[in-house]
Image (cartoon, grey):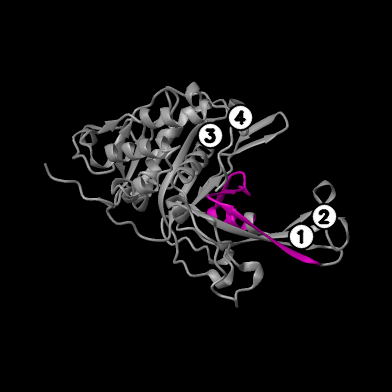
Amino acid sequence: MASRQPFTADDFSIYYVLTECTDHYDPFPVNEADENRPHFQGVTGLRNLGNTCYMNAILQCLCSISPLVEYFLSGKYITALQKDCSEVATAFAYVMTDMWLGDSDCVSPEIFWSALGKLYPAFMKKTQQDAQEFLIYVLNELHETLKKYHRRRAYEKRSIPRFCRKMIANESSIITRLFEGQLNYSIICLKCENCTYKNEVFTVLSLPIPSKYECSLQDCLQCFFQQDTLTWNNQIYCSFCETKQETAVKASISKAPKIIVFHLKRFDILGTMKRKLSTDIHYPLTNLDLTPYICPVFRKHPKYNLCAVVNHFGDLDGGHYTAFCKNSVTHAWYNFDDTRASEIPDTSVQTATAYLLFYSCQPFSIPIQKRKS
């Protein structure tokens, strides 16, 4: 995980600036049956504190990941807290406790929002932010707060090819154990054919969208992992040729995380031109196969199942975020739109509004049983 870096509000305009749509279209309106339904653990709305729908959608997705919930609700996080930066993780635990063990249909995430805002003031301005960037900052901050140092060990399997070996992290946390993956890049000089390798850690994988109208998640993955040729200004320095050369680069996964998050790159900026891609991307709810993109010696994970989705409605000039999450208690899918939470059928989870996809390679169990009063 990268260390926390200070930034200004302008850092959040990398993709776009959104203004909240107050009268956004709601594809799942709340009816009387939803209002009278029993309150289940983890099915809790979040108050919008002023253009904070991006935060609410991310919190709903994180609070639907049972291993993460169990870690915080059980109190395990307390022993890992760094004394000088414990406020964000503690506030995150409070939100999870309210959402999983409280009796209210809606709670306020203000304590968490305030704690994170002290470190990143841009969040306190009540302007629209990018949900994907917010997720990265939250994961990074939780990692920094909960990380533990481990001494490096020798590689356990000497027979593993050098280019496929996983980096052994100095620091680990519940975040790295769940969300951290590793990419391996093979870099081939097209003049001398010398091949070098580079590893890169990721928590969110940003995927290009190859079609304007319709495609599948596999199409996006194939586009990301296909071999690219770097020419002209993108040439890479070759140590053998001692000059920059045209280079072929191909990525593969050398460490597949337990929870893999895909960011669908719907927002595009070319100079002064900005646009949102409304491509209908078909993604599976179950049995997503990543083995074609994983180094052969590390193809040990089963197939992945969808557990949460962040949706974006609107365009570059105005939009709104919601979340679909699968609940580990009821095994049903729910639509979370700020304060409103309503059950939806599996057939409604596949939409053209998907922006972030959360997949798990392991089934979720109930993180903690609510005590009976």
Query: Mark 1 or 4 closer to N-term?
Result: 4
- Label 2 or label 1, whichever comes before in sequence order: 2
Is residue 299 at all visible to an observer of this figure? Answer: yes
Give the quarter of the image for residue 251: bottom right
- Residue 237's disc is 2
Assign a secondary structure to mark 3.
loop
- Picture residue at 45% right of the left edge, 50% below the top: 175
Counting from the top left corner in percent of width and height, residue 369 is at 21, 50
Q: In the rendered structure, which segment of residues is drawn in magenta?
A: 194-223
Residue 11 on image: x %, y %: 61, 31
Frontmost residue, 363 versus 34:
363
Please give the name of the residue rendered at 66% of the width and 67% of the height, measured from the top-left corner. 163
In the image, what residue type sits under mark 3?
Asp
| Residue 248 horizontal side relative to residue 54, left or right | right
Q: Which residue is mark 1?
A: 248
Q: Label 1: how many residues lie within 10 Å, few (<14), some (14-19) or many (20+)?
A: many
